[in-house]
Image (tube, rainbow, N blue to C red):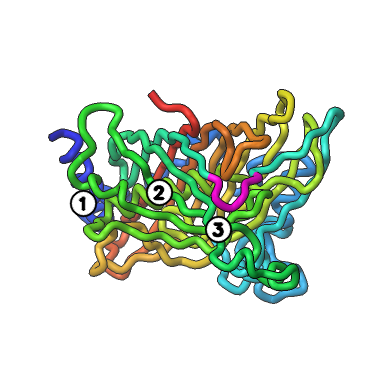
Amino acid sequence: MALRANVARCASMIALGLVVSTIGCQEEKKPAAPIADAGADAQTGPVVGGKLGEALAAAAQAPPAQSAGPKDGAAGGPPETGIFEPAAADAAHAPTAAPKIELFGDGSDPKVPLSYAFAGGDERKTTLLLQVRAAQQGLPPLVVEIAFKADKAKDDKKKTDKAAEAAPAGQPVVVKLASVRAIRGDVPAELKNLKDSVIRYRLQPSGIATDLVVEYPKDSNPGIELMTGSLIDAVLASTVPLPDKPVGVGAYWMVTDRARSSGVDVLRYRVAKVEKLDGKRATLSLEVRQYATNTTLGLPGLPKDVPVSLERYESRGKGELEVGDSRFMPERGQIALVMQSLLKSPNQPAGQQLVIQTETKAALGAAP
């Protein structure tokens, strides 16, 4: 009963967090605490330093020739508010553009090729330990068994080489939740139908994912939508695209793309580094930094009758992943993503702030 009440309370707290007299409101003399849970400092600069940090800062702005570049950020850096003007975000990386992979160094010898290679009809099951917090309330930690399957196109046998070249990049992948269980007690009633969620996208062997579609259960609710979104965030953020050439220890690269995270459309930067090799497998460290591409917040559970928009936005994460020849996603690893937003509303009294924070933690390939 306690878990069940916690889910309902979490959904309601997201809504209540935007009402002046309840959680999420702070006096202006008490600014929102900076995000530190993801392992990076709270400054708006790059997650990493050195040449890579400089590249990250440079990439996070529109070309200087464009008048739509970030107006409130320092020269050579991202916007101080963490929110791009829509035109500037599009100039930095268009919504329909494929993820951009920049290899800054291929590391030392020996080098190995890395891939999530799979073929049509391939399947894989893995486990994910998922823990989500929103509006200072935690949903119960869940162990989710995820089943991946690469669909075969119905007309594959009839396709000519030219037709195949014209087809969308990547193989259709269907992700189903084979089972969902709570670490302690039963899965709350509000999340019973979570296992009926279906996720579809196209995936290239390099890890580039496109055309994401989510099918929610018939009797869905904000709690299910929040958990499904967090699961997608964890799976796709950790499936970091890989270089198309062999890499060794010390290799590092940056991936720039567009995504949706915790109800916000974001411009996402992921920096991966090869920390060690074990045969054909590599252990990667991962740094994530995200910037909002507009001021819209669509987090499940927000009350529709209380208009809010983003005033400041900060999102970052860290992870450690094992990749090599594992299909669909890393063999194992862990990732943590934190988002904190300062909101504004026409109904907001003077001298008060509206703050909301979400945190997603996931352990891949292992569960108690």
Q: Residue at the location (66% across, 29% down)?
A: 283
- Viewer-closest of 335 and 45: 335
The kind of secondary structure element at disc 1 is helix
Q: Is residue 175 left or right of residue 254?
A: left
Q: CA distance from mark 3 to mark 2?
A: 16 Å
- Viewer-closest of 173 and 183: 173
Counting from the top left corner in percent of width and height, residue 267 is at 58, 59
Q: Residue at the location (65% across, 67% down)?
A: 97
Q: Is residue 290 left or right of residue 197?
A: right
Q: Which residues are magenta?
A: 117-122
Residue at the limit of the structure toward the bottom, as seen here: 67
Counting from the top left corner in percent of width and height, residue 100 is at 70, 57
Find residue 164 and name its label. Answer: none
Q: Residue at the location (79% across, 37% down)?
A: 247
Q: Kindly identify which residue carries mark 3.
A: 152
Q: CA distance from mark 2 to mark 1?
A: 28 Å
Disc on the earlier residue, 2 or 1: 1
Q: Are marks 1 and 3 in contact (CB under 8 Å)?
A: no
Find residue 12 and name its label. Answer: 1
Q: What residue type is disc 1 on? A: Ser
Residue at the limit of the structure toward the right, as seen here: 109
Judge whether residue 10 can be spotted in this image. Answer: yes
